[in-house]
Amino acid sequence: MTTTVWTRDDLRLEVEQELRELLARSESAAESYGPEFARLWALASNHVGRGKLVRPLLLLETYDALRAASAPSPIRSETVRIAAAIEVLHYSFLLHDDVIDGDLFRRGRLNLIGELGEASPCVSRPGDGRHWAQTGASWPGI
């Protein structure tokens, strides 16, 4: 009987790969709404990837610790998908907080709203860039 021992780096790679796939599907779907929405998802993907992945890693470590050592793990891939979804949900909460607070920075770097507002394709009057950024960041699904 052998059991797979996952290192934190292994878990991180699994979650990062699932996040890339999840966000690529969303970015592809957003293209039908126009290039500004595809850009929104591309930037969002970049920002989600900056996280420490504490929540998904905790979920996967807990899953691995609790499953029986001899039991096969047919649902591990589903657990990774859930872990990635939890990271996207966490990012959505942070983004919502930034919209409510009017923040343009997170950890000393432009957040999604700051980046969108800085070079918005929809700007025709002063303040429009920030409005587009806050509206885009609040778009369902982000």
Image (cartoon, rainbow, N blue to C red):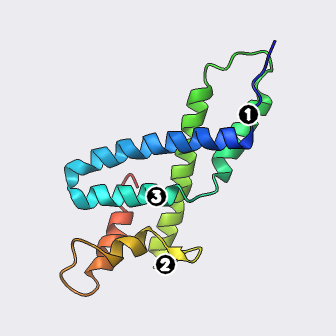
| Element class at badge 2 | loop
**Residue at horizontal 62 percent and vertical 19 percent from the top:** 74
> What residue did someone put label 2 on?
103
**Observer-nearest residue: 138 or 28?**
28
Q: Which mark is residue 46?
A: 3
Amino acid at the residue labelled 2: Asp
Indicate the position of residue 20 as horizontal and vertical percent values. 47, 44
Drawn side of residue 45 relative to residue 31, left or right? right
Q: Which mark is residue 93?
A: none
Within-10-Å neighbours for mark 1: few <14, some 14–19, many 20+: few
Taking 69 as reference, is 53 above or below it? below
Determine if residue 5 is in view: yes
Badge 1 vs badge 3, beta-carbon distance below 8 Å:
no
Indicate the position of residue 131 as horizontal and vertical percent values. 31, 76
Drawn side of residue 56 relative to residue 22, left or right? right
Q: Nearer the viewer, mark 1 or mark 2?
A: 1
- For marks 1 and 3, the one nearer the N-term is 1
| Element class at badge 3 | helix
Picture quarter containing residue 107? Answer: bottom right
**Residue at horizontal 55 percent and vertical 59 percent from the top:** 50
- For marks 3 and 2, the one nearer the N-term is 3
Amino acid at the residue labelled 1: Trp
Amino acid at the residue labelled 3: Asn
